[in-house]
Amino acid sequence: MNKHSPQAPKNRYANVPRAADWTIEQNWPSYSAQEHDRWNRLFARQTKLLPGRACDEFLDAKARLELSREGIPDFADLSERLAAMTGWRVVAVAGLIPDDAFFEHLANRRFPAGAFIRPETELDYLQEPDVFHDVFGHVPLLANPIYAHFLEAYGNAGRRALGRGQLHNLARLYWYTVEFGLMRTARGMRIFGAGIMSSPAETVFSLEDSSPNRVVFELRRVMRTKYIISDFQQTYFVIESFEQLLRDCEQDFEPLYENLRTAPDIEAHELAPEDRILAKGDFHYFRAKGLR
C-alpha cells in the first residue's frame, strides 16, 4: 500500500515493538524524503515567525543544539549534544504514553518524543504530539539548565501526584507552562510553551490577538484552572522567569494539594478576583465560534 494514500495510517510507529518503558527504536534511516521535507517546511515556517516572539532562552538553545532545516533529527545525535549541556536525552515513543512512564522519564532527564511526523493533510494543526511538536517545541529549552531542572522537578512531582489522585491539578501546571506558557521580559511578552512554539497560528494569536486573557502566573491559580485541548487558549499565564518557575515548583506540594481538594475549579475563560491581569480578553474569536 502507498503510505501516502488516504488509507495509510497517520502514525506508522503505532504498532512497532516497544520496551517496558514505552520507548521504541526511532529507526532514523526509515524516514522518507517526503517526511524530511515536511519537517524542513515546518521548521522554516516557524523559524521565520519566532524572532521577537519566542523567548531568548529558546532561540539561544535552538542555535546551540544546532536544530536545523536539514530533515528530522536523529535522536541519538541530538541526545549526545543535549546530554553534554544538561544531562538530558531524547527517547523515541510511538505517541502518548501512560502517565507513570512519562513522569519516570522526566524524573530521570529523558524526554519522550513522538517519532512520527504529521501527515500533509494535518500540516497546520495536529491534536496529538508528533516529532515536530516534541523536538522543535520542547527539546531546545532542555538545553537551558534552569528549565531543565524545572522539568526534572515536574517529573518527580508527577509521581507523587499520581499517588495522591490529584494528577489533574498537576496536569494543569504542565499545560499552562510547558505547553502554553508566556514570559514577561524587558522587551515585551514572549513565548516559551511548546504548544505555541510549534504552531504558527497560535504563535501570533497568543501574543497579538485581543481575544484571550493574559494573567500573571500564580501556582495555585493555575492548578485550579481547566483548559481546552481543541482550540486556542482562552487564558494564558505569564511567568517572570524560569528561576521563578523553578522556585515555585520545588516547594512541597502537600499543603497545596490539601487546599486544592476543596477549592473549586476555575473555567478556562474566567478571571479570578485575585488575578493580576496583564490583558483582559475581549473573546471575539471565541464568541465567533460559539465557544462562550
Image (cartoon, rainbow, N blue to C red):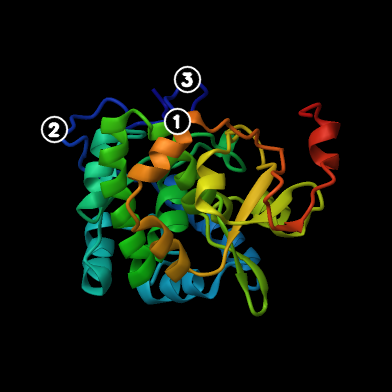
Q: Which of the image's four quarters has the N terminus? A: top left
Q: Nearer the viewer, residue 88 or 228?
A: 228
Alpha carbons under labels 1 and 3: distance apart:
46 Å
What amino acid is at disc 1? Arg
Residue 201 % position (x, y)? 68, 50
- Of labels 2 and 1, earlier in sequence is 2
Number of numbered markers: 3
What number is the disc on residue 7?
A: 3
> What's the residue at 47%, 46% (across, down)?
173
- Name the quadrant of the C terminus: top right
**Residue furthest out toward the left:** 20
Q: Residue furthest bottom?
A: 186
Which residue position holds label 2? 20
Q: Position of residue 215 (x, y in %)?
A: 67, 54
| CA distance separating discs 2 and 3 | 30 Å
Left-right relation of 31 to 225? left
Residue 138 in the image: x percent, y percent? 42, 55
The mark that comes first in sequence, 1 or 3, is: 3
Could you tell me which secondary element the residue under label 2 belongs to?
Answer: loop
